[in-house]
Amino acid sequence: MKKILITGGAGFIGSALIRHIIGNTKDAVINLDKLTYAGNLQSLASIAKDSRYSFEHVDICDAAEVARVFKQHQPDAVMHLAAESHVDRSITGPAEFIQTNIVGTYTLLEAARMHWSKLDGEKKANFRFHHISTDEVYGSLGADGFFTEETTYEPNSPYSASKASSDHLVRAWHHTYGLPVVTTNCSNNYGPYHFPEKLIPLVILNAVNGKPLPIYGKGDNIRDWLYVEDHARALHLVLNKGKLGETYNIGGWNEKTNLEVVRGVCAILDELRPQGAPYEKLITFVKDRPGHDQRYAIDASKIERELGWKPLETFETGLRKTVEWYLNNQEWVMNVSSGEYREWVQKQYAA
């Protein structure tokens, strides 16, 4: 049994990862989370009482507290997901992204290095620091081609620049200090428990409430979509089987324009919760965001070839599961949708 320290475990991907580990393996988890607006322990209610799960309410920028967590729990591995992650928020308020994604990653790396340096024998040899990142560090693709693990970094938003910086820090700590690291860069995640500022849950919730469905520009920006539970499986696999110092790109082979995604949600809602007129009539095109990358697409052949991972969900099956989950979990939605959040969404997506 491994004891895994997971940062950002109350977030969307982090909570899916913890539910996967506790539900499908013998490993134990320490969830370290600051509980910002996007962190929600209700997403972990199904495993919260498991004896292999514990929670630490800690900011990764707090060096003393992070060091205490390492000393107290003595983890065998770290999976680092804690990050500010919304591009729009990074444009209007980049300072938090610099602090959490860069300074926080540095603080965590140093604590992990100090912890690792004191380990002996098999414990030291088996220790891993797994850094979870994004395909947005690579910039924007043209009409053809895919991001590979060798693609040059060209981040275009404050968010992606801060994540690129954290990737470089992790690489430097491996090459300079020998810290045993692996890195993964993923495509757009979607699925249950996604905070409702992101495209798919925003569209679902706006639609069922008869509100406009905001789409930036012409809706022709393309993203590669990855069901979050497929991602969780991949992350745990990379932690256990990935080669030290390597990067693995994780994608779903599901390229869709934003308009296609929104229309897909509308079609499912027309079937599951019809309201007379088609939901597509609620689509509203709003002013494009600054520096909006045109296309992301990941080549996931390395992780498929070397580690044997493949996504289990197609975009169609995953999207249906996602829509059904939101329709059946309105209490969770209400609990995370604070007045501050609603005010921000209304302002951000004004036509």
Image: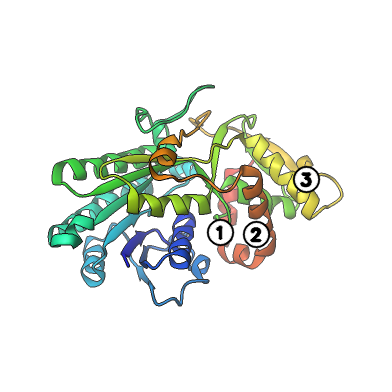
Depth check, front residue: 212 or 93: 212
Q: Which mark is residue 75?
A: none
Looking at the image, is 236 positioned above or below residue 169?
below
Q: Mark 1: few, some, or many residues within 10 Å (few <14, many ≥20)?
A: many
Report the side of 262 relative to 40 (left or right): right
Estimate the x, y position of residue 298 in percent, counting from the top left: 47, 34
Q: How is the image coloured?
A: rainbow
Residue type pointed to by label 2: Trp
Picture quadrant where residue 254 is located: top right
Picture quadrant where residue 184 is located: top left
Disc on the earlier residue, 1 or 2: 1
The alpha-carbon separation of the residues under discs 1 and 3 comes to 22 Å
Q: Mark 3: few, some, or many residues within 10 Å (few <14, many ≥20)?
A: many
Q: Which residue is disc 1 drawn over?
A: 193
As helix, strand or loop, the secondary structure at mark 2 comes to: helix
Depth check, front residue: 162 or 329: 329
Estimate the x, y position of residue 204 in percent, counting from the top left: 68, 51
As helix, strand or loop, the secondary structure at mark 3 comes to: helix
Q: Mark 2: few, some, or many residues within 10 Å (few <14, many ≥20)?
A: some
Q: Which residue is disc 3 drawn over?
A: 279
Q: Which residue is disc 2 drawn over?
A: 325
Residue at 34% of width from left, 38% of height from top?
164
Q: Are marks 1 and 2 in contact (CB under 8 Å)?
A: yes
The alpha-carbon separation of the residues under discs 3 and 2 comes to 18 Å
Estimate the x, y position of residue 159 in percent, counting from the top left: 41, 41
Residue type pointed to by label 1: Tyr
